[in-house]
Amino acid sequence: MKRPLIISILCIIGFIGTIVTPFALLSSTPISPVSGLPQSAPLPIWYIVVSFIFAIGYLFALIEMWRMKKRGVEFYTILLVLEYVIGFASGFATINGLVISV
């Protein structure tokens, strides 16, 4: 089965994002567009660790989408919802940020 162009584009953008994520986290810069933190506020260590775990999960999901597996889309969606729930529960995300990021 030939991969549609839109999936190729989205996966390539996602691969770039998963490469940039560790560098942004190590510089303690909020990288999420839904983040409600001021840019100068340092990120807690637990949030950095959780974000690394999510980045690895996103990479796995993107690889599965690249291979045209349905579970890649399902896993990506689950990770996205979990990331938003953790962000809202811990105060790192706001509704305004969620609306603006869409």
Image (cartoon, helix red, strand yellow):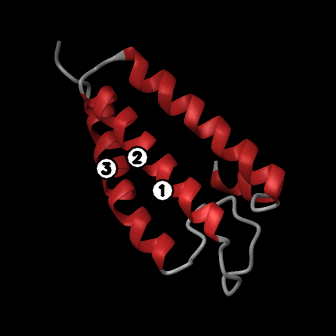
The residue indicated by pointer 3 is 15
The residue indicated by pointer 1 is 52
- Work out whether 67 lies above or below 27: above
**Residue at screen point 49% across, 32% down:** 76
Answer with mark 3 or mark 1, whichever residue precedes in sequence.
3
Amino acid bearing label 2: Ile
Q: Position of residue 100 (x, y in %)?
A: 70, 57
Q: Are marks 2 and 1 in contact (CB under 8 Å)?
A: yes
Q: Quadrant of the N terminus?
A: top left
Answer with mark 2 or mark 3, whichever residue precedes in sequence.
3
Left or right of 94 in this view: 76: left
**In the drawing, what numbered circle is on residue 56?**
2
Q: Position of residue 66 (x, y in %)?
A: 26, 30
Helix, strand or loop at mark 2: helix
Label 2 packing within 10 angstroms: few (<14), some (14-19), many (20+): some
- Please state which of residues 43 and 21 is positioned toward the viewer in this rendering: 43
Q: Position of residue 44 (x, y in %)?
A: 67, 71
Q: Where is residue 101, by image quadrant?
A: bottom right
